[in-house]
Amino acid sequence: SGVKKYFPITGGVFRRTIGAVKAVDDISFTLRKGETLGLVGESGCGKSTTGRVIMKILDPTAGTIRFDGHDITKLSGRALREMRQDFQMVFQDPYSSLNPRMSVGTLVAEPLIVNKKGTREQIRDEVERLLQVVGLSPEARLRFPHEFSGGQRQRIAIARALALKPKLIVADEAVSALDVSIQAQILNLLADLRKEFGLSYVFISHNLAVVKHVSDRVGVMYLGRMVELADKAKLYNQPLHPYTQALLSAAPEPKRNVTRDRIVLAGDVPSPANPPSGCAFHTRCPKVMDVCKSQRPELAAYGEGQFVACHLYA
Ligand code: SF4
Ligand code: MG
């Protein structure tokens, strides 16, 4: 809660700090056990940084991160290493996240070996089991990542992520590099694994259709802030925030008969180093009011299961 992540900007001859990129600017949310929370927004909105802060890959500038009731914000050393086993991340490009010189078996076994999870034979059996869990043959362990397609490589990355029996998986654009037909297979695999192992996911994507497919709740981010957070059905059927409305109006929905009028936003996303005052969206909002320019709207409940940060709902 209250999480901020600012990256300092240095400049001048003395490399002094002259400002900060407010990648994540005061966001709070709770992930429920067994839930998939989608995080959407355009690139640069802070969703990946949020994922990395949750994973403790990055330390927050401010705020606290709790896991199972424990404050893990300041964990370090051995306690952090132990806790890390509960958290795993799956990235966009499985090729760059898998060392090409390691066999698939070694890649999946590595977390088990590093954390001393059994004898050689036990680990080999476990690797074969994990490969089967993600829909690959046990013999895949003898081959190398480049021998596999993008979708299969993502399955290998998922097997590796599952090795330490995590409770939470943060998936950052995990299917964005894949063909649409393969995307569906990987999304279905993630959904099956969630049921089977009681996993929770934070699912980060710029793709609203993908997020809709997998999420229970969805958070919409804009310039480092959470502007709307709602149950999936609410968010997609009655979006409240003008930014959510614009994003959805631009997303194609081939199976629906409703044609939303496309809302075209003026201008580009402003720089997070110099976000607009008040509501950060006010420079592009079709419904902007005077108050929006000076007062920052806080995320507040509006109806059942829906939170929005916008003065229209005050
Ligand atoms: Fe638009 Fe104002 Fe709402 Fe921001 S607070 S989204 S500018 S109406
Ligand atoms: Mg990103």
Image: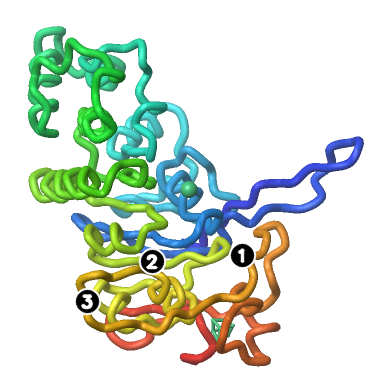
Residue drawn at x 37%, y 53% as measured from the top left: 204
Residue at the spot of label 2: 219
Location of residue 50 in the rendering, given as x and y in whole percent from the top left corner: 47, 52
- Residue 50 vs 275, above or below: the answer is above
Q: CA distance from mark 1 to mark 2?
A: 18 Å
Location of residue 147 in the rendering, given as x and y in whole percent from the top left corner: 25, 18
Q: CA distance from mark 2 to mark 3?
A: 23 Å
Query: Circle 1 sits in a helix, a strand or a loop, which is it?
Result: loop
Give left or right: position of 278 versus 212: right
| Category of crowding for the residue at label 2, using alpha-carbon neighbours closer than 10 angstroms: few (below 14), some (14–19), many (at least 20) | many
Residue at the spot of label 1: 269
Location of residue 118 in the rendering, given as x and y in whole percent from the top left corner: 15, 15
Q: How is the image coloured?
A: rainbow
Q: Are marks 1 and 2 in contact (CB under 8 Å)?
A: no
For residue 277, say whether it is visible.
yes
Give left or right: position of 259 versus 51: left
Residue drawn at x 31%, y 16% as measured from the top left: 114
Residue type, mark 1 in image: Val
Q: CA distance from mark 3 to mark 1?
A: 29 Å
Of labels 2 and 3, earlier in sequence is: 2
- Residue 233 vs 73, above or below: the answer is below
Of labels 1 and 2, earlier in sequence is: 2
Location of residue 145 in the rendering, given as x and y in whole percent from the top left corner: 28, 20
Q: Residue furthest right?
A: 13
| Category of crowding for the residue at label 3, using alpha-carbon neighbours closer than 10 angstroms: few (below 14), some (14–19), many (at least 20) | few
Residue at the spot of label 3: 256
